[in-house]
Image (cartoon, rainbow, N blue to C red):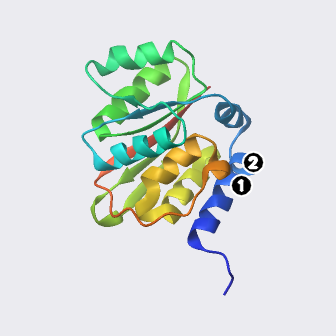
Amino acid sequence: MTGLSRRDLMCRAALLSAAFGIGGSTKAAMAAEPVLLYDASFIAARRFAARAVALGGAPTRLDGDRVRQMRALLGFAPAACFGVSRHGDALLLCEIALEAGYRRLASVQHQAAGQLVASCLSQGVTIGALARIAGDRWPETFAEFALGGLAHCQMSANAGVADPAFSWVLVKS
């Protein structure tokens, strides 16, 4: 047995994914300020947003006309978008982003009882692995990953099972 804790392993996975596991365009995306979107009707999304705020990020609440909101955000040409939302919003926002020259790098479906299903391109497969390692703390880990990975990893208590939601990553093609 090693002295490596689950959290330490997760932090190292974030470092490795940022350094080696994801493609060049994604590395550039991580260097720029990403757009962080969340649906406040989900506990997991609120946890994601709260952690992002604690790290100095500025998450945007999905509100009103999703099409207009997403087009306006993409008008600023962010290098990446990270979101936690319901499945329908994830599909709609990803379609809008595809039209604007983005591609979906990863999508993680969080189901009841802590189960998840990850759908990742080869460049984003480490995001799915990181979600599995993070377990119940995925919303916070996802915010840490979005805003700098290893530099923001911290030890913290288990936050409890998050409700079903989708987390997803879009990058500029």
Name above or below for residue 83 compared with residue 119.
Answer: above
Name above or below for residue 83 compared with residue 10.
Answer: above
Looking at the picture, tell me which residue is in the foreground, 45 or 120. Answer: 45
Q: Quadrant of the C terminus?
A: top right
Residue 61 showing in the rendered view: yes
Q: Which mark is residue 158?
A: none
Name above or below for residue 97 compared with residue 160.
Answer: above
Q: Which mark is residue 19?
A: 2
Q: Secondary structure at mark 2?
A: helix
Q: Secondary structure at mark 1?
A: helix
Would residue 160 appear left or right of 53 to someone viewing this image? left
User: Who's the residue at 35% across and 43% down the image?
Assistant: 45
User: Who's the residue at 29% across and 53% down the image?
Assistant: 164
Residue 118 showing in the rendered view: no
- Decide: few, some or many residues near mark 2? Use Cα within 10 Å; few <14, some 14-19, many ≥20: few
- Decide: few, some or many residues near mark 1? Use Cα within 10 Å; few <14, some 14-19, many ≥20: some
Looking at the picture, tell me which residue is in the foreground, 140 or 106. Answer: 140
Q: CA distance from mark 1 to mark 2?
A: 5 Å
Q: Amino acid at mark 1?
A: Leu
Residue topped by disc 1: 16
